Amino acid sequence: MKCNRILLTLLTLLWCSLGASAQLRDVTTVNPLSPSKSGYNMVVYEYESVDIRPQFPGGERSMINFINETREYPYNAYHRRIQGRVLCSFVVGTDGKLFNIQVLRSSGDETLDREALRVIGRMPRWSVGKIDNTKVNVRCVLPIAFRL
C-alpha cells in the first residue's frame, strides 16, 4: 500500500515537472573525446512541445521498476536517515541515448544526487521524440525519490 502511494506521488511529480514554458532551447554540449574539449550548440525541444514524446522502453511502469531495481541507497545517507528527492534533467537524443544528465534541484545530500545521476545514466535507450515525423532531441525532467 505504501509502495503504491510512493509510485503515485512519483508519477504525479514526474508529470507536474515535465511541463515547461519554453518550447525550444539551445544547449551547449562538450565533446569529451575532443582534445580541446570544445562545445557545440544543438537544438533541444521541451517534452511538452513535441508531437511524439520520448518514452522509456515498456512505458512508465517499466521505468519505475527500473529505477527501483537500479537505485542503491548510499550507505552514509542510509545510516544518517537522510531522505530526499533529486530533480534531474536529461536529453533524449535522436538515437534514443540519454545525455546532458544533470541535477536541477538537489536533495541536499551530494551522495543522493550522485546516485540519481548514476541511475539515469544506466537507463537503456528510449524511443525518440518526433516533430512532424522527424526525430528531434527532447529534454525531459525526472524526479528520483529516496525514502526510508
Image (cartoon, rainbow, N blue to C red):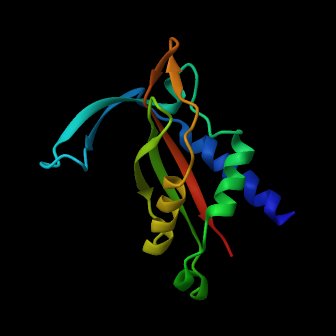
Q: Between residue 96 and residue 16, name the one nearer to us.
A: 96
> Would you identify the image quadrant in which residue 139 lies?
top left
Residue in the image at 53% along x and 85% along y: 76
> Where is residue 24 shown, x and y percent of the image?
38, 27
Answer left or right for 72 relative to 137: right
In the figure, is residue 121 to the left or right of 39? right
Q: Is residue 3 above or below residue 50?
A: below
- Position of 122 with respect to 39 (left or right) is right
Q: Look at 51% across and 70% down and name the residue there.
A: 112
Report x, y in % for residue 17: 55, 44
Q: Give x and y (percent) for residue 124.
A: 57, 46
Please identify the residue farthest to the right as the structure is shown: 1
Extreme-bottom residue of the structure: 79
Q: Residue at x 44, y 34 (%)?
A: 93
In the image, farthest residue toward the top? 132
Q: Residue at x 45, y 63 (%)?
A: 106
Of residue 91 and residue 106, the one placed in the foreground of this image is: 91
Residue 109 seen anywhere in this rendered image of the structure:
no
Q: Position of residue 102 (x, y in %)?
A: 40, 53
Looking at the picture, does residue 48 appear above or below residue 5? above
Is residue 115 visible to us here? yes
The quadrant holding residue 65 is bottom right
